[in-house]
Image (cartoon, coloured by chain):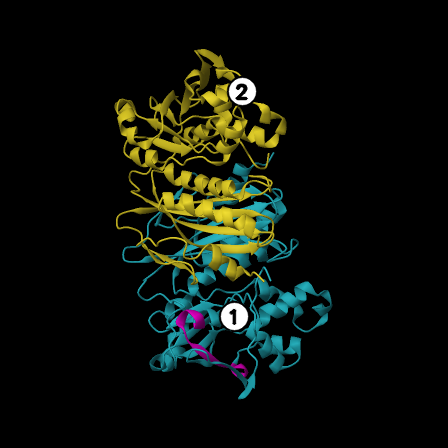
Chain colours: A yellow, B cyan
Amino acid sequence: MFGEFNLIEKYFVGRQSRRKDVLLAAGDDCALLKVPEGMSLAVSTDTLVAGTHFLEEANPAWVAHKALAANISDLAAMGATPAWVSLALTLPEPNESWLAPFCDSFFKLADYFDIHLIGGDTTKGPLSLTLTVQGFVDAEKALRRDGARVGDWIYVTGELGDSQAGLDVILNKELRNKPFAEQLEQEHYLSTPRVLAGQALLGIASSAIDISDGLAADLKHILRRSDVGAHLELSEFPVSSQLIQFIGSVDKAQQYALTSGEEYELCFTVPEQYKGAIDATLAHCGCQVSCIGQIRPKGQFLLSNKGQPLDWPQQGFDHFQ
Amino acid sequence: MFGEFNLIEKYFVGRQSRRKDVLLAAGDDCALLKVPEGMSLAVSTDTLVAGTHFLEEANPAWVAHKALAANISDLAAMGATPAWVSLALTLPEPNESWLAPFCDSFFKLADYFDIHLIGGDTTKGPLSLTLTVQGFVDAEKALRRDGARVGDWIYVTGELGDSQAGLDVILNKELRNKPFAEQLEQEHYLSTPRVLAGQALLGIASSAIDISDGLAADLKHILRRSDVGAHLELSEFPVSSQLIQFIGSVDKAQQYALTSGEEYELCFTVPEQYKGAIDATLAHCGCQVSCIGQIRPKGQFLLSNKGQPLDWPQQGFDHFQ
């Protein structure tokens, strides 16, 4: 009664005004696309599986936002401008009461960033979705992970820790009575990819990554690729007042900030000569930035709280651990 | 003991010599890629789910080949030259005895077509894989579905029907005693995407599609997009001698050819003035081509067998039917 092709037609085709660089989208064997002259293509893929990355019964609108935001965040971390997305959606059955809010939320966020859905696949099976986003960036300036140098300052956008606290609420119903529990649950799903900030940092930041596995784990990717060490000062970590009230103290909130995954804030490094320009550079981006440490020589991993040394956390988030 | 990141390092990173247009691949937030000047990007996404598109216990080498071949076939159907692929792999657990043959087979086919794995995702969950391939094509010449005109001749590459017979063998163990059962099972998984044929048809074919849902269903996509009808002559359908022996008669084999899905042969249309050039055009491509019918005005759907009219099949393959 409701087949694969009808599904695509009804929920996905013709929902967006076409970008000029989309020569051909749904309805053929491939999409045909035009990359602006002189620009490189930035491509990233993310999979979200029910039971692993979200609960089967999670709000479909939130799931759509989380999946697309996480994927856009990878473009933001390169300083790229988003352009296109492919969506592979696997569903146990064609459930319209799930699909309608999913698509409304998906296209709302896509439209906000002027991202065109260029194709994908709908298949029958256990609930999961895989997105591939593409964007444009000048390859010479792109924010890579391997450019951090000793002495560079370490920054993060926004506030950290809310996502982990939200996940705690999702997994433990007893926490729902705590202050701001509902808001934190929403924040876990409804992050804002830092696209403007990423673009503003082109030519300023020496390296960048988005925080998906937790700040400690993601910063380590930068350190390994750049062959350097780091010193982080926990008391400088930006945390929200709602997290402090939920969790009981500033100290505990900042501990959360160190390992909270799926934040989709940017962690980036800035050479000394640009440090003074950071606030002005990011003034139009609508997010705060905080300097939380400094790049050190290889082998040095220092974590302190108001100067007192702490242990560096061993592990980030890993689906197979 | 064997985490997400180690998996990627061990099985996927550094397995290929890098293409010059891959500026940055695994190990950062995005891949960075360069599209040749004047060319458009062709992009296609396919998902294969265990239990829907292959059996959980299927040979992992065959699953890898099938997934990548099906995806490359979409590029072939546009006349595009393959370049890059992203692989999102979801596994119940990091099983090395599954991953090793899967990756060997995946990279063997990727290397054959000079396709570079530019990134992806590995996640925990029910076995499935989503691939996004990208290639280059001159958008003015690309083989679309909407270019067929009344009078154009309808062609297919290769032989049809083996894939369906192979699926029958997979699903019904009693058929294993029939002649060529084992070969047909293999052919179901190990198709050859018609990349060379697709490229050779640029500027010659007026439309093209690859046969994934069955010839009857896929030709209908061309007819609907081109706003035309068609006449097919079943006795001209190319079938293999092994299929004839497996199934018992030429007639029955040609019936199979009409609806057999996942063939990954090309169906294309050629204007009268290029009909004489087809054999020479495709001589270097290593596949036979057969003229099986002609485009008719909209509303005419004729199927005959040695001139005798037959009923046109109603349905193609649909995961949700």
* Relative image position of residue A114 (x, y in whole percent): 35, 46
Disc 1 to disc 2, how far (Cα)? 58 Å
Query: Is A234 drawn above or below residue B184 in the view shown?
Result: above
Count neighbours of disc 1 (C-alpha within 10 A) and say few if under 14, some if 14 to 19, many if 20 or more: many
Which chain is mark 2 on?
Answer: A
Identity of the residue drawn at 33% across and 21% down: A151
Residue that label 2 marks: A247
Quadrant into which the N terminus of chain B falls: top right
Q: Which residues are magenta?
A: B223-236
Disc number for residue B68: none
Q: Nearer the viewer, residue A91 or B200?
A: A91
* Relative image position of residue A218 (x, y in whole percent): 46, 30
Q: Nearer the viewer, residue A57 or A279?
A: A57
Residue that label 1 marks: B217
Q: Amino acid at mark 1?
A: Ala
Q: Nearer the viewer, residue B267 or A169?
A: A169
Q: Judge from the rendering whether residue A295 lies leftward or rightward of residue B61; answer left or right.
A: left
